[in-house]
Each structure stands twice: as structure tokens, then as C-alpha cells.
Amino acid sequence: MGDMGEQRKRGRNRSTRALAVPLLWLLLAAAPAPGQAPLALSADAGTTGHVDLRLVAPPGAPVTIAETVGARTEPVAALTPTASETALPHAVAWRCQRRTRRFVAVAADGRTATTSVRTPSCRDRLGLEVARRTAPHRALTVRLRDRWRLGGVPLSLCLVPPGGATTCTEHELGADRLRIPVRLSRPGGWRVTAKAPWRKAGRDVRVRRRGGGLRLLVTGDSMIQPLDDFLRSRLRGARVDVTSDPNISTGISKPSMLDWPAHARALAAARRPDVSVVFLGANDGFPMGAAPCCGDAWVEEYARRARGIMASLARAGRGRVYWLALPAPRGGFFRTTFPAVNAALRRAAKSAGADVRLIRLDRFFTPGNRFRESMRVGDRTVRVRQADGVHLSTAGASAAANLIIRTMRRERIVR
């Protein structure tokens, strides 16, 4: 038994010596050559906006550090360390287009050390702050900041009104907060958007008049009845104050009964409408100056007068105007005058600016300029025209009111 124990002991010693030889070679290979200090490079993205580097290298020996970008390199630093460890804070800035950053340190003797780090995305880099509610024309401050605190960021600040044209201004965002004063004119839902080269941020702002709701003016000739009543009843819950202004048998081409351009100016001054709905033109067709109905000269003059009415009710951007095109009539002289009026309205609305929208009731009720007395509304067929073949029936006015309200909601004027 003693001989067997001795043999096992000698076997274990031989195994230990056999394992020790390759381990020794590995340690010798990993160790720096005699008199050669280690070379190492590390990177950290913990400082907002920057990558910090740390170099371990022998003092007194030059070292260059570069960033590897594909097959090329971009220089970062060239230095001669005075200590075995050298900190390089803010070595490079974070970048939106390059999140994985790779670096290489090259010593004078040709040795290299590499490192890499992953930086945050630009998704939340742009900060935008603005009040959620305000009153019309009240001073409002939009606060913008670069959360990376780098600055030098070109951006566009855009205001998207409830209906109408978007307006943008150009700015440069520095390392500190940028404060931009704005005034939002008419009530409704606005969108405030800041766009940087790499990201867009937006906020919704509700503009509401203190102590009162949206002011809606419904005006025109007999065509607006009973459309005005449907608008009043269906918008009551949205805090909309509706003023109805029917002027029976009047027209733009017959100022002897009512001077519509002057009347519109008076309405705008007295009512200050936020939104105007105009349904007018069924009684037109009278000569204007030397221009008889319904040639191009007549259409041009009608458009000029209608454009003036639109401008008055738009109130220099403080109001939104919805003008309703005339649905095709059944027959009579209306078949000549209605297309001329609609042509003039299209011409006027196109040149009146973004605060005016022509709602194409002609397409809705009479596609292809074909008169129809009844049509499908929802899940049933209803009669949408009165017996005279001109005016909308009660069901037709109800459908037109729904179309107008859908448009107002789509444009964020009402909720």
C-alpha cells in the first residue's frame, strides 16, 4: 500500500509540472518587454455630450490618439504624457449620426491600444417647453434647449394655426436655453414645432379666450337657413357662440339692397369673429359696371368683391373664413349664374390667402355639376334640396353643417 501511495504522489507532481510550463509561457508573452511600460486606452460616455478618454502610457514618450471611422481615422489628440495615466476629458463630442465610437492610441514605438464606447441617440436631445393653454394674442414664451449642452444647432420654430398657413422662423440653439416669444392669434388648437437637423419636437397649445368661447359668424343670403341653426345647436357643447346674419334676397352683384363689402367690414369690426361661414350668391347675376353676367370680366369683378369680403372677415389672420360653394341648381337662369359665381369664388379664395377655405358643397351635393334631389347620407337616402331646386332642404342643411363641423375639427378649430 505504501508503494502505491508513493506512485500516486509522483504522478501528481509530474502533472503539476506539465501544467505549469505552458502557463509560464502565457504570462511571459502577455507581459511587456523589459523596460517597456504598458499602453492602454479606455473611453467613457458618462459626461453629457462628450466622450472622456483615459490613456495609460509611459511618461515622456509621444502618443497619438485618433478615432477610427470606417477605413479612415480622424485625429483626436497628440501628446507626450508626463505621468503613467493621462485623463482627456471632453475628448470628442457626441454625434447623432455616429453612436458607436472607436479610438486607437499609437505609441512612438509602434504599439497600439484600442477602445470603443456607445453614446446615446438624438431621440430626446431637443427639449421644447411651452404653456399648454393661453389666450389669443397673449405673449407666450417657447423655451428650447439642447440637452447635450453642445450648442451650435440650427433649427426652425414653426407655428401651425388651427386652419391657415404654417409660419416658421430660423434660429440657432446654443449651449444655454433659447427663449423665443410668440403670440398665437386666433382661438383653437395650435401646434408649436421645433425642427433640428436630426430631430423634431412638437407641443400642442390650446388658445381660448378668457370668459368666452369661440365666436362664429354665419352670414349670407337665404341659403344659410336653416344651416345656421344646425351649427348653433351642434356646437353649443364646444363653447361656440354663434351669431346668425341672414340677409334675404341680397347679393354681391346687387349692392342697391346691401353693399356686401361694406357690410362685411362692419361685421368684422362689431363681431370680431374667430370663424366666419359665408353662404352667398344665389341671388346674383346682375351686371357689374359694364360687365354683364356671366363672362370673364363679370367673374373677375365678382372675385374682386368677394376677395374684399374674405379679407375683412379674416381680420388680418385673426379669423378663419369658410365660404360655401353653390350646389348646382335644377334649372332656369341659375344654371348660368351658379357656375359663374363658383368660378369667381374659386378665383377669390385662391388669391385670398391661407385664412380662407372654399368648402365645395357643389362637389358634395352635385358631383359633376349634376343636380340631384336626393342622396345617400349615412345609412339612408334623404331629400337634400327644396322643391325650388335651389335651396338645401332641412336634411341637406344638416348634412352641410356636419361637413363644416368636420372641417373645423380637422383643422383643430373646435374639438
Image: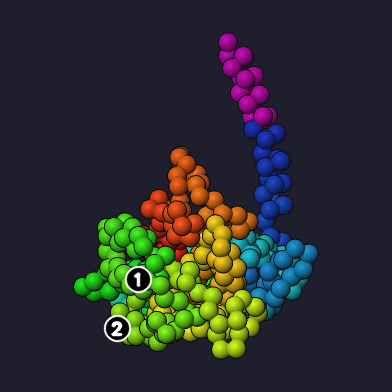
Residue 141 vs 409, above or below: the answer is below
Residue 72: which quarter of the image? bottom right
Q: Is residue 35 left or right of residue 236?
A: right
Distance from disc 2 to disc 1, alpha carbons, whole Å, reads 16 Å
Amino acid tagged 1 = Pro
Magenta stretch contains residue 226? no
Question: Identity of the amino acid at label 2?
Answer: Ala
Is residue 112 rendered to the left or right of residue 82?
right
Residue placed under numbered mark 2 in the picture = 270
**Residue 406 horizontal/vertical position (percent):** 43, 57
Neighbor class of circle 1 (other Cα within 10 Å; few <14, some 14-19, many 20+) is some
Which corner quadrant of the image does residue 87 belong to? Answer: bottom right
Residue picked out by circle 1: 246
Q: Which residues are magenta?
A: 1-15
Q: Specify the principal SS of the magenta part.
A: helix
Residue visible at 55% across and 82% down?
A: 287
